[in-house]
Image (cartoon, rainbow, N blue to C red):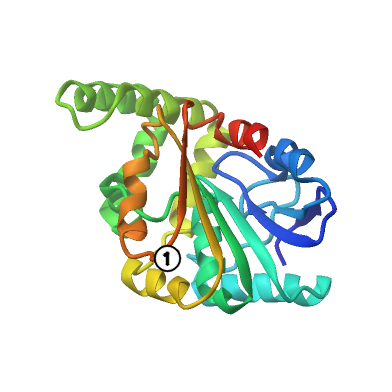
Amino acid sequence: MLPVFRLSDGPVPLLAFHGIGQDHRVFEPLARALEGRYAVYAFDLFFHGAHPPTVTDDALTKTAYQQHIQDFLHQYRLERFAVVGFSMGGRFALATAEAFASQLEELILLAPDGITISPWYHLATHTRPGRWLFRYLLKHMPLLHRFGQFFIAIGLINRSVLKFAESTLATAEQRKQVYDSWVYFQKLQFDHRVLSALLNQHPLRIRFFAGYFDQVLPVSFLEPLTRGLQAYELTVLKTGHNRLIEKVAKLL
């Protein structure tokens, strides 16, 4: 089972999934803000945290992930719950919502990954040549930087995206973590029409939070899912990607 930490107390269990390079502690400000309303259960995802769960397969399947959450729900005797996911954790929040839609009370997504799939991510994880190139570039960061500068010059990426990537890949340990995570999570993808139809069938509250200055996962990346939803709430805050959890905590 995924390592989990209870960060607050309240009548509604809230399962929380962090972003790349983070761990459960990133939700501590949010848990303090929600004390008395939500019992925040923050997970350490694969390849993250002090004691990440053992990986036995080449890629995580939805079925295997569902079993992790089922084991957690059984252990803590939870029937109804809410879910929050930030950035990469959005994939896990969406996978949880898809598998347990009938038990879900609320879905909260903060600049979630997993809705709009970057072509760079697809190239780096879904083909053998792409994975080889990804590993090569991670071992030759000056070359990756030059590629990034070229893509900025021709308008394919924003400068803040390159800055975010380089900060996330600053050390050899970080680069291994990113590579392992990207490849292992590649099967957590969603048919947005099917998922939105499923969510529409249940009386749950769906809330999106995005950063106005976020170029990593901008608000436009929500559209493939939101256009199929009958009801949802969207809040755009004047912040970038990295401070979104902090800003949402203050808002709540």
Q: Position of residue 130 (x, y in %)?
A: 28, 50
Q: Which residue does the image show at 27% across and 51% down from the upper left?
A: 123
Q: What residue is at 79 percent from the left and 52 percent from the top?
A: 5
Question: For the residue marked with disc 1, what is the amino acid?
Answer: Lys
**Residue at (50% x, 37% y) in the render:** 175
Q: Write down the residue under mark 1.
A: 187
Residue 148 vs residue 143, the one in the foreground: 148
Percent coordinates x, y for residue 176 in the rendering: 52, 41
Residue 145 locus on image (x, y percent): 33, 23
Left or right: 209, with 82 as reference point: left
Local SS, label 1: loop
In the picture, which quadrant includes the C terminus? top right
Q: Position of residue 173 (x, y in %)?
A: 58, 35
Q: Quadrant of residue 24?
A: top right
To which quarter of the image does residue 226 belong? bottom left
Is 25 left or right of 196, judged from the image as shown?
right
Q: Quadrant of the N terminus?
A: bottom right
- Identify the residue at horizontal 73%, vertical 76% (top origin): 79
